[in-house]
Each structure stands twice: as C-alpha cells, then as structure tokens.
Amino acid sequence: MHNELLKKAFEKAEKETETNRVSPRAKLLSDFIFEDSREQYGEKSLRDKYAVATNNPESKIRLKKHAKEALSHYLGYEDYKDFLNANSEREIVSGSQVKLFVSKNKITIMISLVIITGLLIYNSVTRQRWMVWQKDHYIEVKFDLENYDIIQLKLYKEERIKNFKKIKPNCDYEFFNADGSVRVWYGKNIKRELEFFTDHGLHPETGKTLKPITQYMINKYICNNEYN
C-alpha cells in the first residue's frame, strides 16, 4: 500500500500547488514530512519512488516509517494504520462493471467530474493555511501564485510562526538552556552569509538543515563579531 499512499499524496499535492509537475509537488511533500516528523525525506527519493509507483505499478516501493506516517497525516488519516484500514475496506469493482457503467452514463459522469474537481480544488486551496518567510520570520498568507512563488509557500505551522525567528545575537545572548540544551541554530544564506535562528529546522532560503550552535561558533563568529 506504500504505492497507493504515495500516489494519493502526490494527487493531493497537485491540487494544492495547482501544477502537475513532479518537482514542486515532491518539495511540498518533503517539507511536510520534515515539519510533521522532524526527520528529513528528500525530494529526489520522493520523485524516484513516485516514478516507480506510476510507471511500474507491479513494483512495490518502500517508504521509511516516519515518511509513511507523515504522508498519512497529510491525507487526513490518524496514522498509517488508519490509512490501511480505510482503503482496504473499499469495495473493488471489476473492470467490466466500470466500463458498462461509464458507457451508460458518459455525459453525466463528465459533468459531475468537472463540478466535483472544481469544488475540490477550490475547497482544498482555500481551506489549507499557508505561510511564507518574510525577512526574519514566517507570516501567514493566502495561496497566491501571483505574489508568491510556489517554492516560497509553505504549509502553515503555528509553532513555526511563533518560535522560528532569525536573530542577531551578541556575546551576552543566552545560547543554552539551564540543562545545556541549545537555544540557537545557524546556517548560511544564499549569499554565503552566516545567520542565526531561534529554532531548529531548514534554512528559509536555502532549504538546508540548520546546525546547533557551539561554543566554538560563539567565540569565533559572535563574540568576535565576524559574521556582521
């Protein structure tokens, strides 16, 4: 059922991104998997497995546990087990029955499909919440491809809105909690400039995983003020 799960996820992503191109849909799903599970699952892996699932239906793909759970959440299921139960209960209709039904109801089916597809796309895009990176924090926005590139639009996450900020810490900043855990992460932007953030995750511009701050980085790049 991993094949079916991935294909359904790409189908939903097509409606949300309003494109049938594989790469933008794979990026959206990869971002969602990371935000949902805090574990990465690359766009390339998703593209490759989707190609197998669609072009070689007899071949069985395998998704990592965190990926199949996250994609099940993306499709509205409680977990992967819930996805399996829901889809295994569906009645399987034979090809001959389908052909007979379609031949008798072609016009009705075509009209219904146009209406239903339009409603699904409208509801999906308008109900889903989105956010974009603005200078040093995320803000909530509407799905608007006239003002935002598809790469800029991220699925809305309240904890990202509240907790993920870009900062310019000085030497007196509290970089660690009382238990020694990290409070600051860092990474380079597209200009190769060092930047600091208040939570872990991906760099908003480059998409690369941020690294936890270390005393070495603090001494070299912050206390010596070399990153400004």
Image: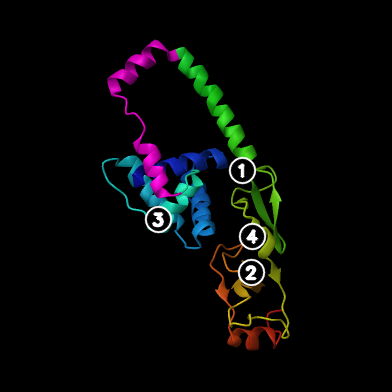
Q: Which mark is residue 160?
A: 4
Type of amino acid at the residue the image marks with label 2: Lys
Marked residue nearer the N-terminal end (2 or 1): 1
Residue 117 x/y as whole percent: 53, 28
Residue bearing the label numbered 3: 45
Residue bearing the label numbered 1: 128
Residue 54 x/y as whole percent: 35, 41
Residue 20 shows in this picture: no
Quadrant position of the N terminus in the picture: top left
The residues tagged by marks 4 and 3 sit, at their Cα atoms, a distance apart of 25 Å
How are the colours assigned in the image? rainbow
Question: Between tags 3 and 1, which lies in front?
Answer: 1
Q: Is residue 78 left or right of residue 53?
A: right
Residue bearing the label numbered 2: 191
The residues tagged by marks 3 and 1 sit, at their Cα atoms, a distance apart of 25 Å
Residue bounds of the magenta highlight: 79-106
Q: Secondary structure at mark 2?
A: loop
Marked residue nearer the N-terminal end (3 or 1): 3
Marked residue nearer the N-terminal end (4 or 3): 3
- What residue appears at the point 43 percent right and 14 percent down from the top-left corner? 106
**Disc 4 to disc 1: CB gap under 8 Å:** no
- Magenta segment main secondary structure: helix
Q: Residues within 10 Å of mark 4 (few under 14, many from 20)?
A: some
Type of amino acid at the residue the image marks with label 3: Ser
The residues tagged by marks 4 and 2 sit, at their Cα atoms, a distance apart of 23 Å
